[in-house]
Amino acid sequence: MESLRQKAGFTLIELLVVLAILAVVASAVAISALPGDADAAREDARRLAALLEAAMRDSRASGRGIAWSAERQGYAFWYRGEDGDWTLYPRSSLYRPRALAGPTELTAVLVDGRSLAPGERVVFAPYGLRSELRATVAAPGAQFFIEGNVLGRVSLARVYAN
């Protein structure tokens, strides 16, 4: 009579197969949870709109001008130093220089309909913005317009393609 051996537990191969399946499922969940380009552009546009409005408000409240400059991949806010020159806000400030996420870009910045020149700053004076400001934040699949007016109001709108 042959001795029958009872099987108890799982074999090593079975455990490795289950672990591999769990790893694939966990990777799929992690990738689907990452924000897409459109979400990153929306967050960058919201942040920029809020910061522009706050800078206009702070300029009026403090009686001191605040300037904003834009580059394709980011933007910075400036204040007048003791020597009268424009100085970047420190990294610890709300107005610290910021880079845009991933493929998000400032594709256009217009002041009264003309493009902002490289290195040019938009000045938020204590008595209000003298010009109309329009910035376009774009990423693959999403485009947002930020508009600031002479009354110090900033609006954000998403542009949908037809």
Image: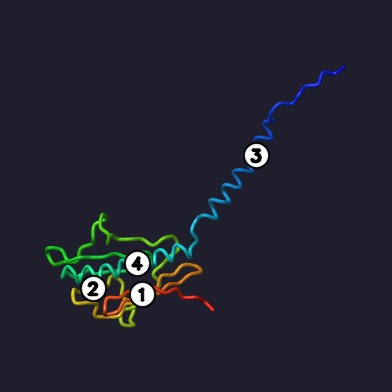
Residue 107, how many percent across, how many down? 40, 72
- Please state which amino acid type lies under the numbered disc 3: Val
- Please state which amino acid type lies under the numbered disc 4: Leu
Q: Which residue is under mark 2?
A: 123
Q: Which residue is under mark 3?
A: 18
* Nearer to us: label 2 or label 4: 4
Q: Which residue is under mark 4?
A: 48
Residue 47: quadrant of the picture: bottom left
- The mark that comes first in sequence, 3 or 2, is 3
- Please state which amino acid type lies under the numbered disc 2: Val
- In what element is the residue under mark 4? helix
Residue 88, how many percent across, how many down? 23, 62
Mark 3 to mark 4 CA distance (whole Å): 46 Å
Mark 1 to mark 2 CA distance (whole Å): 18 Å
The circle on residue 117 is: none
Residue pictured at 23% horizontal, 73% vertical: 124
Mark 2 to mark 4 CA distance (whole Å): 15 Å
Residue 63, how many percent across, how many down? 15, 70
- Kindly indicate whether the residue at mark 1 contacts the one at mark 3 (C-beta within 8 angstroms): no
- The mark that comes first in sequence, 1 or 4, is 4
